[in-house]
Image (cartoon, rainbow, N blue to C red):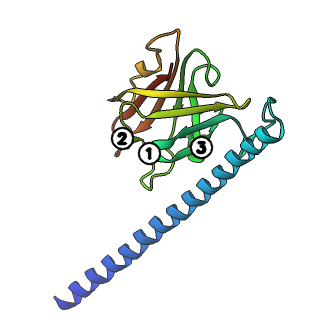
Amino acid sequence: MKKVINIILTILIIMAIVVTGIIIYNYVISKQNDDNLAEVVTEIEEQFTANEGQQAANVQYNGYDVVGIIEIPSINIKYPIINKTNDTTMKYSITKFSGGDINSIGNFTVAGHNNLNGTMFGKVKRLQIGDEIKMTDLYNNTVTYQIFDIYSVEPNDVSCLESVDENTREITLITCTNGHLNRLITKAKEVA
């Protein structure tokens, strides 16, 4: 009996070490990606300063075009937005999911992973009605949006892609709820 208990304890200790290693590895990789994304934002902002009034030229991250910057001050988020959504780009940054150009009339929708370590849209669940989202295009035009609705939908429900008012600028954030059972939708419209 004592031998069986020792084997079980050994297996549990090994499992704990492996799980801890995986958590640390994922944290380090995520932190490195976050640092790289901060460098992309800095690069864009430096181009704005050096070439006032001109478009930031040829900004890419891991071979994908960047279309602008999303900033959410209340939860300390500032990321470049990659021009398309797929499994690969979602691992890298916030991505354009739907809509026209950043800050154009209509609903510009972005998607991001709900990372448990708080990166990407991992802190979006803390947002509240009235919080602000700033969107900057590659010409350094920044528009401030205010959150007016937060809700969850089933994974296949795409009704959030529709504009509440087609004559305004609107932003929709999409991320998974913990457990990936539903999608957390955050909608904001331009501050008048």
Say whether disc 3 or disc 1 marks the residue closer to the N-terminus.
3
Q: Which residue is disc 2 drawn over? A: 177
Is label 1 in contact with label 2 (beta carbons under 8 Å)?
yes
Q: Which residue is disc 1 drawn over? A: 114
What is the three-letter code of the residue carrying label 3? Tyr
Q: Is residue 119 above or below residue 191?
A: below
Q: Note whether residue 149 is visible.
A: yes
The local secondary structure at tag 3 comes to: strand
Horizontal side of 175 relative to 94 (left or right) equals left
The local secondary structure at tag 1 comes to: loop
User: Which quadrant does the N terminus fall into?
Assistant: bottom left
Residue found at x 51% / y 18% = 192
Q: Is residue 79 above or below residue 182?
A: below
Q: Measure the C-alpha gap from mark 2 to mark 3.
A: 20 Å
- Say which mark, if any, is on residue 22: none
Q: Which percent across, then down, holds residue 59?
A: 76, 39
Q: Which percent across, then down, holds residue 17?
A: 41, 76
Residue found at x 58% / y 36% = 95
Q: Is residue 77 above or below residue 147?
A: below
Q: Which residue is disc 3 drawn over? A: 79
Residue 144 or residue 149, whichever sits in front: 144
Residue 18 or residue 109, whichever sits in front: 109
Q: Note whether residue 86 is visible.
A: no
Horizontal side of 31 relative to 10 (left or right) equals right
Say whether disc 1 or disc 2 marks the residue closer to the N-terminus.
1
Q: Measure the C-alpha gap from mark 1 to mark 2.
A: 7 Å
What is the three-letter code of the residue carrying label 2? Thr
Q: Which percent across, then down, holds residue 142?
A: 63, 30
